[in-house]
Amino acid sequence: MILTIFRARVRPEARVEYARLTERILELARQTPGYLSCKDFVGGDGECVTLAEFDSERALRVWSEHREHVEAMRKARASFCLEYRIQVCSVQRGSSFPGRLSVASFGG
């Protein structure tokens, strides 16, 4: 499994439009073959964090090259984000408690 961590600080005046764009982008991600889950959060300090899981590097690559996703990243750099950071991680191991936090419970 591949985990992508996207962290951003959004310009205060762009938060509403950024939230709308994020909603659309997450909707598209869910349609990508190999997509497993995605969650986004806003920290107490205002940092936006998105965690996206894909079943393979190939699936992530397909997603990262999606035309609308590429355009959204361009717009984020130009208009919304003060800064951002993307980390792509290969999950080495994991554990879970049955019935909790499974991929299916995230709405896949």
Image: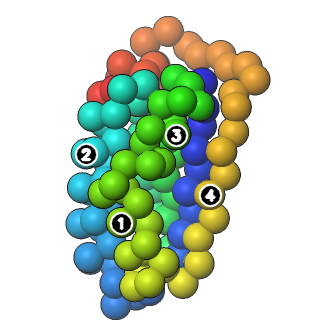
- Kindly state the secondary structure of the residue where label 2 is placed: helix
Pointers 4 and 3 in contact (CB under 8 A)? no
Q: Earlier in the sequence, mark 4 or mark 1?
A: 1
Quadrant of the frame with the C terminus: top left
**Which residue, given by chain and number where applicable, does mark 1 sit on?**
71
Note whether residue 99 is visible. Answer: yes
Distance from disc 2 to disc 4, alpha carbons, whole Å, reads: 19 Å
Pair 4/3: label in front: 3
Q: Residues within 10 Å of mark 3 (few under 14, many from 20)?
A: few
Pointers 3 and 1 in contact (CB under 8 A)? no
Q: Earlier in the sequence, mark 3 or mark 2?
A: 2
**Which residue, given by chain and number where applicable, does mark 4 sit on?**
86
Q: Earlier in the sequence, mark 1 or mark 2?
A: 2
**Which residue, given by chain and number where applicable, does mark 3 sit on?**
61
Residue at 69% x, 39% y: name it.
Answer: 89
Distance from disc 3 to disc 2, alpha carbons, whole Å, reads: 17 Å
Q: Amino acid at mark 4?
A: Ile
